Amino acid sequence: MTYFAYLDEFGHIGPYVGRQDPIHNDSPVFGLAGFVLPSEEVRRFGTWFFQRKCELLAFEIDRSRQHPARWEKKGSSDVDCQPPEDFVLILDEHDQRSELITEAARNMYAREEPRRHLIEPPFHLESHRYQTLQAADWIAGLVGRLAAAWADADTYPENEVFRRYFEDRLNRASHRSGVRT
């Protein structure tokens, strides 16, 4: 079985002092979030996501005057595979693309504990062209808001609504998480 892992980043990779700090105020967390699908489910999920996006965001799509397939609303791990299952990793475009691909290749071909189930280094795609990657962006946006609330609930009171509506569902759906509080 081959799996597709769609990931997007959340938070900020740089230093964080606090929301009121004049420079280091972006986010107390950084990470990747998304989902993994068996290859035979990718097209069906992409179609389902596209239909829901068109249905729920019709007003914004119409106002943009773009084709719905190219329009995206920004959302602002990998689950371990059991042998002999393989996976393809798909990431949104990233400014450190070259470094990420190099590190993935090093891990794939490492002498000790190689990542034998990763078929190729990550593919970097334009999210506005892939419904599945847009869904990963939305999930990453949600996880980023939850993680910020977990890290510093008093500083992020506006994220309490995400905890109320999505925290339990996310915890039930997560097979493996690197988010630590």
Image (tube, rainbow, N blue to C red):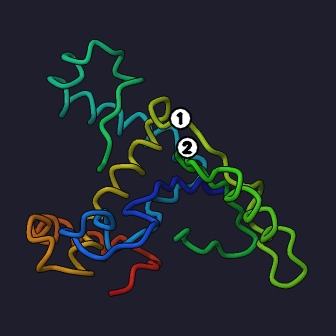
Q: Position of residue 103 (x, y in %)?
A: 74, 65
Q: Position of residue 134 (x, y in %)?
A: 40, 42
Near-viewer residue (72 or 16): 16
Which residue does the numbered mark 2 point to in the structure image? 93
Q: Which mark is residue 33?
A: none
The image quadrant where one finds the C terminus is bottom left
Which residue does the numbered mark 1 point to in the structure image? 126
Q: How many marks?
A: 2
Near-viewer residue (39 or 136): 136
Q: Is residue 65 visible?
A: yes
Mark 1: amino acid = Glu
**In the image, 128: left or right of 116?**
left
Q: Residues within 10 Å of mark 1 (few under 14, many from 20)?
A: few
Residue most extreme to the front: 22
Q: Quadrant of residue 58?
A: top left
Mark 2: amino acid = Glu
Residue drawn at 56 percent across, 50 percent down: 91
Pick whichever of labels 2 and 1 is earlier in the sequence.
2
The answer to whether marks 2 and 1 mark residues whose Cβ atoms lie closer than 8 Å is yes
* Element under disc 2: loop
Residue drawn at 81 percent across, 83 percent down: 113
Q: Is residue 1 visible?
A: no
